[in-house]
Image (cartoon, coloured by chain):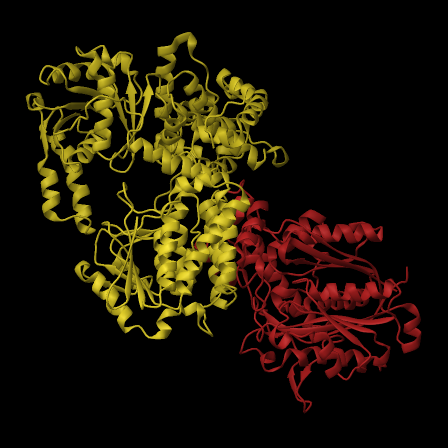
Amino acid sequence: MTEAFIYDAVRTPRGKGRASGSLHEVTPINLAVTALQAIESRNDLDTSLVEDVVLGCVEPVGEQGAVIARVAALHAGYAETASGVQINRFCASGLEAVNMATAQVMSGQSDLVVGGGVESMSRVPMGSSGGAWSADPQVAHNTYFAPQGIGADMICTKWGYSRDDVDAYAVESQKRAKNSWDKGYFKNSVIPVKDMNGLTILDHDEHMRPETTMQSLGALDPAFLVQGEQYGFDAVIKQKYPEVEALNHVHHAGNSSGIVDGAAAVLIGNKEIGARINVKPRARVRSFGSIGSEPSIMLTGPSYAAEKALKKAGMTAADIDLWELNEAFAGVVLRFMDVMSVDHSEINVNGGAIAMGHPLGATGAMILGTVLDELERRDQNTALITLCVGAGMGTATIIERV
Amino acid sequence: MINYSVDNDGVATISWDMPDRSMNVLNNDSIPAFADAVKKASEDEAVKGVIITSSKPDFIAGADLEMLQGWSGAQEIFDNGMELQMMFRSIEKSGKPFVAAINGTALGGGFEICLACHHRIAADNPKAKIGLPEVKVGLLPGGGGTQRLPRLIGIQAALPLLLEGKHLSPEKALKLGAIDAVVPAAQLQSAAKAWIMDAKPEAAIQPWDKKGFRIPGGAPMSPTGMMTFTVGNAMLREKTAGNYPAAVNIMSCVYEGCCVDIDNGLKIETRYFVNTCNSPEAKNMIRSLFFGIGNANKLASRPKDIPTQKFNKVGVLGAGMMGAGIAYVTAMAGIDVVLIDQDQAAADRGKAYSEALLAKAIKRKKMSEEKAAAILRRITPTTNYDLLVGTELVIEAVFENREIKADVTKRAEAVISDDAIFASNTSTLPISGLAEASSRIGNFIGLHFFSPVDKMPLVEIICGAETSVETLARSMDFVKAIRKTPIVVNDSRGFYTSRVFGTYVSEGIAMLAEGVSPALIDNAGKMAGMPVGPLALADEVALDLIYKIRNQTKIDLGDKYIDAPSDGAVTKMVEDLGRVGKREDKGFYDYPKGEKKHLWPELGQHFKQLPENEQPALDEVIKRLIYIQSVETARCMEEKVVTSPEDADVGSILGWGFAPSRGGAISQIHTVGVENFVSDCDRMAQLYGARFTPPKMLRDMAKSGEKFYAA
């Protein structure tokens, strides 16, 4: 099988995902264009060599509809020969897009592909694309549908993570994100979003709250109590986990991922193409994969996805230097660390979505770039990137520096 | 059957009047006759518009469930269902204005006819009930109800009516927009005619047949619709735990049907109707909740050829919780009550119970002050047994103590006439033993009421060894008079209901002692369809009471006592841990003041729990909790404690809340098949103990293929 290499990875900063957020004035197309043009300009890339642009997007309707990947590539000035495809694996869409780009290269069907993702959560809010899962009575009934937050709280209830546990994790995430920004660890990969006049609209992740303390978090009300107790979702998930008497609602806005806008892009190709475009490969993709697991608790997929990717790569957890697990909810990471025996010092070392936010379709590609930068900074070799995914899925990718 | 007339103004009237029935129903006779009349009116050029009404006090009560039971096979039900849909559809597509003149109750298919009309006018009949109650017997409205109601009043307003089967008064129905007008009863026909005379051509077109129609409040895929269904689905699962497919199917009819046009919606509804009709839950609920309870209320099993007894005066001995409740329901039925206790204050307190209930009814505007006063006047609280003279029936509800019961029996019998019935409301003491205190042993019977008497619909009638057939028949007349549902059982320890109910609680406690997670046990009980989990129920009954009754039974039975699987755990809770239940805020649960109860955190220390990977599956826990009740009920039938499957089923549902969707303790066996039940019980007997061993009667039935019910 052909080896697939990562030649570059960029992302936009993350704007607060509401009207007061800096990126709310920017169309999702222009977010994606920012990332795609950076790939082109940083590498002086002949875009006629790009065979496909795979972008993740979770709410692909309205402004994000009609195959945003193709339209963004055209609008970014890519050669019209570069096709585009929009994919959706919920929260792992950005990583899945990279994996699909990788698969094209590994299978020998493409030489150079861009993977990435985009989500303007402020302009196309969560839930915009509707769907049968929660609304269709037969489907919701048969799958014990409950919102993610309820699943996250169930994880903490079932495996005994307290409010203090999740809050402490969140405080640390903020601390790490602040430290990384302060020390410039992100500056190589974050591409400021600018207007048509070249004026900067946003050049940093604006969701962070570095002043966060246990005390400030303690003042927040649990976010999923009403959904759980008044709208029936606690009962639904308890019918799936009848050994649980009552849910402990520990998650809130301060220990869950932030709602933000942003985009990311990753350039993937085979060895030969690197010579042709005259760019040195930064890492190879060792393995990747997605899994399905119990959909009602929904968020325990990452460990299974990680196991699958490790097995495919012929590796064990001990072979991984750095771990990156999307901080959808603090409880998801705590559970993952326990299951995989991963020390907190090796995972999400630059902070994560609790501090910086989770632009659904883009996050997977963003955190892949972040951890690659960190491997280079630390001069370490291997990293495993994974995300929990709606409906009980999980996606993981293992990269190794070359 | 269906009267048809056309007046000089060209207004046709189709009036329902089924012979030999107090209520009009949709059945194999009335549907074709109605269809003919609709066709005739539609095709007659001289007819300007059509009034659909009834010549009886009520409009139409709904579809005849016997007709539905006669349909079988998916294709037949689908074809019959679609034929009805097309007939209703022909009303709204006829081009002539149709108006429903709703003179009285219009339920189910009756209200669906109204919905198919272009206009609905109801008489201001306060007794009239309007609604779609199909879900209550496990069915769904199959005559367009799930399609037209949401199109008329919006999805959010329609769903509760469809899912809860609520009845509306005409006034309420008007407020919701389910009908268009309410007029004085005398003006109903003229108002209907006036609407036709004034009707413009577009009045004969339903809103949903007009161009650009939108569902009021939004279609399922609108943001509001998505929210309504997402939350509605969860709340439905919370309520039903998947035990009521009819409810989910109703949701689906509305969801899927409102995404498309009405014609496709009606087809979707019919497909779900077929699916629902064929579900075991619908069969169980129709059998037990509709026919079973209905037949019991009609006293179908009453011994024949014994004149019906009318009750004018009844004595109640003991004015505690039970006696006070019995006095209340008796007075409510228009019967005079002599309520006796040891001292006047206690007797007065018993009457005060009725006063409080009636005051509440007045406050809720359910009763007038005059009527309440008349009811109260019927209750005479006293200490004087002489006042019992002239009673047709005396019911004792004194302490569960043989001596006290014997004493009041003698004192009452000294006053009452020779043919009066003496009944005991005991729940634990065998009737034949108590009857020994009676000088008129044939007139002695057990009438076991449930607490609270004013709410619980069942009365378990217990025949002692010497109870006469006349006494039984007359006692049944009394139960009917007070509008309760009787089942008849024979004398035995715990009779029928208490005996089987006890197995549910006991099995739950047994599992706790085995190391099953207590949350799993109680969640499984609720998910099985029982109203409360077994451990919570034990707390409510009180563990020390269970303990006392157990010890008394041990003394009574001596060597014959068979250890219950819960005995050890109950002893431990009461003797060692001092946790007696809800009464003292500590049992299997803690009851912190002002907060929700929760399982006692130390429970796991005193009853060592199995590791997670050895915990039983939910389905197995449910099976144990349900099957133990069914196997004990089968034993009761074998021992002739209860003699008919109908009584066993009705008694289990009304007596202790056996999961209604399972149709009752015997219907549960019938549903899974006797043979399957027997083999599962044999397996469970191996694993959990001999209490699961099926009685010989079941083995014989399994072998011969005999069934409890034909369908």
- Residue lying farthest bottom? A197
Name the image quarter holding residue B321.
Answer: top left
Which chain appears red? A
Name the image quarter holding residue B555.
Answer: top left
Which quarter of the rendering shows the C terminus of chain A?
Answer: bottom right
Left or right placement of residue A289 versus residue B661 in this view: right
- Residue B153: % across, % down: 38, 64
- Residue B135: % across, % down: 41, 47
- Residue drawn at 24 percent across, 29 percent down: B479
**Residue B161 seen in this snapshot:** no
Which chain appears yellow? B
Instruction: Return the residue nearer the eye: A312 or B593.
Output: A312
Which quarter of the rendering shows the N terminus of chain A?
Answer: bottom right
- Residue A194: % across, % down: 67, 85
Residue A384, compared with residue B634, is above or below; it is: below
- Residue drawn at 50 percent across, 62 percent down: B263
